[in-house]
Image (cartoon, rainbow, N blue to C red):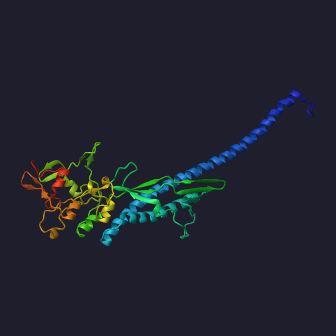
């Protein structure tokens, strides 16, 4: 009997024991759950940091490629001569810009998450006032290509590829993630970039900006239809005239001929070098037209094909007439000439009857 008059029997005492034991066990479970939650949340933040780094590199690769394309085009135009190795120059610019982007973005990420970030065994500084830190990527880590992972070529953009295998480490007290980056690709469109090939090859008298011809069509069998002569009215052949004029381009400027895929043409890197590069995928190549015959004083009355690389090499062509007498002129008012090779390829007739 206790001091309040209650009697504690052996059975009652035994019933209390599991309650005491359970209370102790529950306290341990709560502590373990708290510890596990801390580890899990920390791991989630670390894993999320790794994912964010990959996104930073991918976005930076595309932006750096676009910047490099514009920079390379301006360099050829300003220097007034072609490059000897356009891909090397592009990689140099991309590497510099990508390093700046990744270091800036990952420095902020490091401050926000409290993690130390290492890329390519280089610690990303949290304080960017010190400008002597090392770069994360070298040129050997980066390639540029106009071919996607499936082997398809793209005339109107290229990929900046960060090679797989670059070491990465994310560190928090008590936790370390170490691994290597997968291959990362960022897409850099060249739409809107000025074409240095036109500038140089017309002796600085003509310019063009790369905009895609919208009517080009290729079916699943690989057959191509340019749709240049879908409609012929008056003295115009459509959509050839619109292609020559550059109709509906974002600059709202006429006389900027559009570009279309052409396996015998020149891709962007070849346009920076002034000629075809051995080993390039034909699907990456494109062509456009040169209107107004800017080298008329050089060609002295010869009927030179308006296709850009034919015009640059002096290939002669013949005109196109409508109803046998009306000459088809380009939007600059000059007769439009084209080689028989490309008349057959497009295909275009020598005369259209309406």
Residue placed furthest toward the left = 325
Q: Is residue 145 visible?
A: yes
Measuring from the top left, give residue 61's x and y in whole percent: 44, 58
Relative horizontal placement of residue 300, taking residue 192 as reference (left or right): left
Measuring from the top left, give residue 171's x and y in whole percent: 61, 56
Q: Residue at x 37, y 50 (%)?
A: 151
Please identify the quarter of the rendering in which residue 271 is found: bottom left
Measuring from the top left, give residue 244's x and y in whole percent: 21, 57
Residue placed furthest toward the bottom = 79
Measuring from the top left, give residue 74's x and y in whole percent: 34, 67
Q: Residue at x 27, y 51 (%)?
A: 214
Please identify the quarter of the rendering in which residue 318 is found: bottom left
What quarter of the picture does the N terminus occupy?
Answer: top right
Q: How many marks?
A: 0
Please identify the quarter of the rendering in which residue 3 is found: top right
Q: Is residue 194 visible?
A: no
Against 336, residue 76 (above or below) is below
Q: Nearer the viewer, residue 5 or 28?
A: 28
Against 311, residue 154 (above or below) is above
Relative horizontal placement of residue 107, taking residue 323 as reference (left or right): right
Q: Residue at x 83, y 32 (%)?
A: 16
Relative horizontal placement of residue 143, taking residue 130 as reference (left or right): left
Q: Nearer the viewer, residue 163 or 229?
A: 163
Relative horizontal placement of residue 288, taking residue 164 as reference (left or right): left
Against 200, residue 156 (above or below) is above
């Amino acid at each position: 009997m206790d001091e309040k008059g209650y009697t504690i029997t052996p059975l009652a005492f035994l019933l209390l024991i599991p309650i005491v034991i359970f209370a102790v066990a529950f306290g341990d479970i709560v502590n373990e759950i708290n510890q596990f939650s801390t580890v899990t949340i920390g791991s989630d933040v670390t894993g999320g940091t790794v994912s964010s780094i990959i996104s930073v590199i991918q976005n930076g690769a595309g932006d750096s490629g676009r910047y490099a394309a514009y920079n390379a085009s301006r360099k050829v135009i300003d220097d007034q001569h072609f490059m000897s190795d356009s891909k090397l120059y592009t990689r140099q610019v991309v590497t510099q810009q990508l390093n700046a982007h990744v270091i800036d973005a990952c420095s902020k990420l490091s401050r926000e998450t409290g993690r130390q970030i290492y890329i390519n065994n280089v610690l990303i500084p949290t304080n960017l006032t010190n400008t002597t830190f090392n770069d994360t990527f070298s040129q050997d880590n980066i390639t540029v290509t106009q071919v996607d992972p499936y082997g398809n070529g793209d005339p109107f953009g290229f990929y900046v590829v960060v090679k797989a295998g670059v070491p990465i480490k994310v560190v928090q007290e008590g936790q370390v993630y170490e691994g290597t980056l997968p291959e990362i690709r960022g897409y850099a469109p060249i739409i809107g970039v000025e074409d240095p090939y036109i500038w140089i090859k017309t002796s600085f008298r003509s310019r063009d900006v790369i905009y895609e011809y919208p009517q080009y069509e290729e079916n699943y069998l690989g057959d191509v239809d340019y749709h240049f002569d879908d409609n012929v009215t008056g003295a115009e052949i459509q959509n050839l005239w619109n292609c020559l004029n550059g109709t509906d381009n974002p600059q709202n400027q006429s006389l900027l001929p559009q570009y279309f895929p052409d396996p015998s043409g020149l891709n962007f890197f070849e346009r920076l070098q002034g000629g075809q590069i051995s080993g390039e995928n034909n699907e990456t190549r494109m062509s456009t037209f040169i209107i107004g015959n800017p080298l008329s004083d050089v060609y002295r009355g010869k009927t030179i094909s308006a296709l850009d690389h034919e015009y640059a090499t002096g290939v002669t062509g013949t005109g196109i007439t409508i109803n046998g007498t009306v000459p088809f002129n380009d939007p600059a008012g000059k007769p439009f000439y084209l080689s028989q090779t490309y008349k057959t390829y497009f295909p275009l007739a020598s005369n259209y009857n309406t």
